[in-house]
């Protein structure tokens, strides 16, 4: 799996604020209720609303840095799960193993005195581990759409 690291001159707070501005959060209870109701039009309409112009929404975030600092580890770190239930269907129709990489996981971090970084496994590389997903165009779509978005957030040119 190919790890991509984007280094930013922006502060950790600036990068995470931009991530959280660009990727609207999914309300997981609402998403589950819509799925259970079985109305595909309402489900898709909600997903499109959340995905917005970015084409992806945020499923989850975890502030790991705040959990490390009390132990004396001088770092900021947030883990994000970003994706689209609509796009994800193009993976899950091949196999449930798609759940290991959909939604996509990436980390924004900054150790004291260092630049902020965004680390992500390249989606095409990550999904290539699973032969049953090889027919899906979604990993390449994620590479083409998500990586440039993250680079813009980091304030760098993509591809680097």
Image: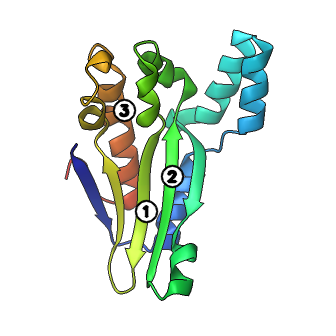
Give the vertical position of 105 relative to 117 (above or below): above
Of 61 and 8, the residue lying toward us: 61
Locate the N terminus by quadrant. top left
Q: Secondary structure at mark 1?
A: strand
Q: Residue at x 57, y 75 (%)?
A: 66
Res 108 label? 1
How far apart are labels 2 and 3 at the CA level? 15 Å
Of 134 and 17, the residue lying toward us: 134
How far apart are labels 1 and 3 at the CA level? 18 Å
- Residue 157 in sight here: no
- Residue 8 in sight here: yes
Q: Secondary structure at mark 2?
A: strand
Residues at circles 2 and 1 in contact by the CB criterion of under 8 Å: yes
| Between discs 2 and 3, the one toward the N terminus | 2
Give the vertical position of 50 relative to 61 (above or below): above
- Left or right: 28 as drawn, with respect to 1: right
Q: Nearer the viewer, mark 2 or mark 3?
A: 2
Res 142 label? 3
Q: Secondary structure at mark 3?
A: helix
Q: Residues within 10 Å of mark 3 (few under 14, many from 20)?
A: some
Residues at circles 1 and 3 in contact by the CB criterion of under 8 Å: no
What residue would you read off at disc 2? 80
């Amino acid at each position: 799996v190919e790890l991509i690291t984007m280094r930013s001159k922006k502060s950790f707070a600036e990068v995470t604020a931009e991530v959280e501005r660009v990727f609207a959060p999914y309300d997981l209870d609402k998403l589950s209720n819509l799925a259970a109701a079985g109305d595909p039009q309402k489900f898709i309409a909600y997903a499109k609303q959340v995905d917005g112009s970015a084409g992806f929404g945020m499923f989850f975030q975890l502030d790991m840095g705040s959990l490390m600092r009390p132990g004396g580890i001088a770092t900021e770190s947030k883990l994000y799960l970003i994706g689209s239930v609509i796009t994800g269907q193009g993976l899950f129709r091949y196999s449930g193993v798609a759940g290991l990489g959909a939604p996509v996981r990436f980390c924004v971090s900054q150790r004291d005195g260092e630049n902020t970084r965004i680390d992500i496994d390249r989606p095409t590389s990550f999904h290539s581990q699973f032969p049953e997903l090889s027919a899906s165009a979604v990993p390449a779509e994620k590479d083409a759409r998500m990586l440039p978005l993250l680079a813009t957030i980091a304030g760098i040119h993509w591809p680097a």
